[in-house]
């Protein structure tokens, strides 16, 4: 089978335009929640462009991840929502984020990599066309810090499996993302004091190590489909703080790409960056902006606002008590937050509900929480929300309702609030005026 050429992939077309001098990019939605997926597709439909949605290895794997979904399940979820929204399937790009031994770091490297082999194959076979090869983390019998050569060698192993799987299954050959200085999935675990961008020399060494490892594995012909390098631009968030992008600190790092014909940077943990900083990132060659917890954070804001509206409109016996149910379930099952949120009980409660790191996102699939969410939306859909209450708790959505641009239905309010978190990304990437396929402006 002939390998897929770069022009066969809309992401490759985007990168080619960026490398030709156009300050264009694409944002990557890293969330498995159906409401966030629906919001992302609605935003892409408004922009007239493609939507890039990625499943992270801890969300979706061959065993189900924390969502209970395997790669095929997540693909079917996303494409089903696209069908519901009348959004063309060929404008949906699926990616796999942090694919490697991330989920199995507590195991010896041989066992962890064996699981990673199966993980990569499952994603490629299911039709994911953007694959982040992430072997940057140490396993149980590894030293605390891995060399570029070890990381690149393990990545080459996974690349071989991805390519062989595509050949065997007839799937589209993916484009790839590499990197050894990869931010922790989902934001920093602890409170940060400072953050330094990746040194230029380290970025060059990473590229060289991967190029060499791929060639040694007989995969040098795949190198043109390596489209992005993950480096740290100096952006991150922890529980209470956001580190904003400072372009004056990345001047030397940006020069790394001058001699790389097909490489751009991929920025992780861009959640909560201000609009101007998002635009500067794209201009400075971070042509892929990843966002995840910031979207479920926005969804939680909307649902909590609706819960407070519910207390004004619905008799106590019939209320969803969503916020209380969440608190009870998080206390009963503390595994997703107790190693992250410290301090006294009040500080921990505040963090469980409101922190930037949004560990609450792991709890939305919980059956009791999901049932409370559904009850909340049903209650408010039944009684209707008076406009003054929308103004009180969701003022931006109120203005759009008044202008005739937004349906006042409860779920529509939630989706629109998530889109508020996406709109700055769309503007930063110029997806509304520079579609991946040079579509019409809006």
Image (cartoon, rainbow, N blue to C red):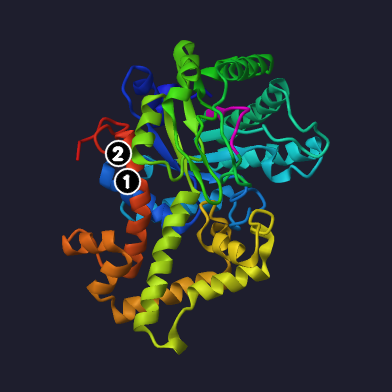
**Pick the front one: 15 or 225:** 15
Disc 1: which residue: 423
- Element carrying mark 2: helix
**x and y, in percent, of residue 388 in the image:** 24, 73
Q: Does the magenta stretch include residue 181?
A: yes
**Image mark count:** 2
| Residue toward you, 366 or 303 | 303
Q: In this view, does 87 lie above or below 279?
A: below
Whole-percent x and y of residue 342? Answer: 66, 57
Q: In which quarter of the image is residue 223?
A: top right
Q: Are marks 1 and 2 in contact (CB under 8 Å)?
A: yes
Q: Is the magenta stretch mostly helix, strand or loop?
A: loop
For residue 432, side relative to residue 203 (left or right) = left
In the picture, measured across the screen, residue 45 lies left or right of residue 350, that is left
Front residue (pair 276, 205): 276
Q: Which residue is drawn at 42% across and 59% down?
A: 299
Q: Quick check: can you spot residue 421? A: yes
Image location of residue 76, percent across then percent down:
48, 52
On the image, which quarter does residue 247 sit in? top left
Q: Nearer the viewer, residue 237 or 107?
A: 237
Q: Identify the residue at image location x=38%, y=36%.
A: 278
Residue that numbered label 2 is attached to: 427
Q: Is residue 54 magenta?
A: no
Classify mark 1: helix, strand or loop.
Answer: helix
Mark 1–mark 2 Cα distance, whole angstroms, equals 6 Å
> In this rendering, does residue 87 appear at all?
no
Q: What's the magenta region? A: 176-183
- Residue 358 in percent (x, y) is at 53, 55
């Amino acid at each position: 089978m002939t390998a897929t050429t770069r022009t066969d992939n809309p992401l490759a077309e985007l990168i080619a335009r960026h490398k030709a001098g156009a300050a264009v990019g694409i944002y990557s939605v890293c969330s498995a929640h159906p409401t966030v997926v629906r919001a992302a597709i609605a935003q892409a439909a408004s922009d007239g462009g493609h939507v890039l949605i990625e499943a992270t290895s801890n969300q979706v794997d061959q065993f189900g991840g924390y969502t209970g979904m395997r790669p095929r399940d997540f693909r079917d979820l996303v494409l089903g929502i696209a069908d519901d929204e009348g959004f063309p399937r060929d404008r949906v790009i699926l990616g796999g984020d942090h694919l490697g031994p991330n989920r199995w770091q507590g195991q010896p490297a041989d066992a962890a990599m064996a699981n990673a082999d199966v993980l990569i194959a499952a994603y490629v076979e299911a039709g994911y066309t953007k694959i982040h090869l992430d072997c940057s983390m140490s396993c149980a019998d590894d030293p605390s810090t891995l060399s570029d050569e070890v990381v690149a060698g393990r990545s080459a192993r996974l690349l071989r499996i991805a390519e062989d799987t595509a050949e065997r299954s007839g799937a589209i050959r993916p484009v790839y993302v590499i990197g050894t200085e990869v931010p922790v999935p989902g934001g920093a675990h602890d409170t940060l004091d400072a953050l330094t961008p990746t040194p230029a020399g380290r970025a060059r060494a990473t590229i060289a190590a991967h190029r060499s490892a791929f060639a040694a594995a007989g995969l040098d012909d795949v190198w043109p489909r390596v489209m992005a390098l993950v480096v740290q631009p100096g952006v991150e968030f922890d529980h209470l703080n956001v580190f904003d992008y400072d372009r004056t600190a990345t001047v030397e790092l940006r020069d790394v790409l001058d001699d790389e014909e097909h490489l751009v940077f991929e920025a992780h943990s861009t959640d909560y960056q201000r609009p101007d900083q998002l635009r500067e990132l794209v201009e400075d060659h971070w042509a892929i902006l990843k966002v995840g917890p910031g979207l479920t954070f926005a969804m939680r804001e909307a649902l909590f606002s609706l819960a407070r509206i519910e207390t004004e409109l619905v008799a106590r016996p019939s209320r969803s008590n969503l916020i209380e149910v969440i608190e009870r379930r998080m206390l009963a099952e503390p595994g997703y937050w107790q190693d992250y949120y410290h301090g006294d009980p009040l500080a921990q409660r505040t963090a469980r509900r409101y922190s930037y790191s949004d560990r609450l996102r792991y709890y939305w699939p919980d059956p009791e929480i999901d049932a409370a969410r559904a009850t909340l939306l049903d209650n408010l859909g039944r009684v209707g929300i008076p406009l003054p209450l929308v103004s009180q708790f969701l003022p931006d959505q109120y203005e759009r309702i008044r202008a005739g641009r937004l349906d006042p239905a409860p779920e529509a309010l939630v989706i629109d609030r998530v889109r508020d978190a996406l709109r700055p990304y769309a503007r930063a990437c110029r997806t509304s005026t520079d579609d991946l396929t040079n579509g019409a402006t809006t």
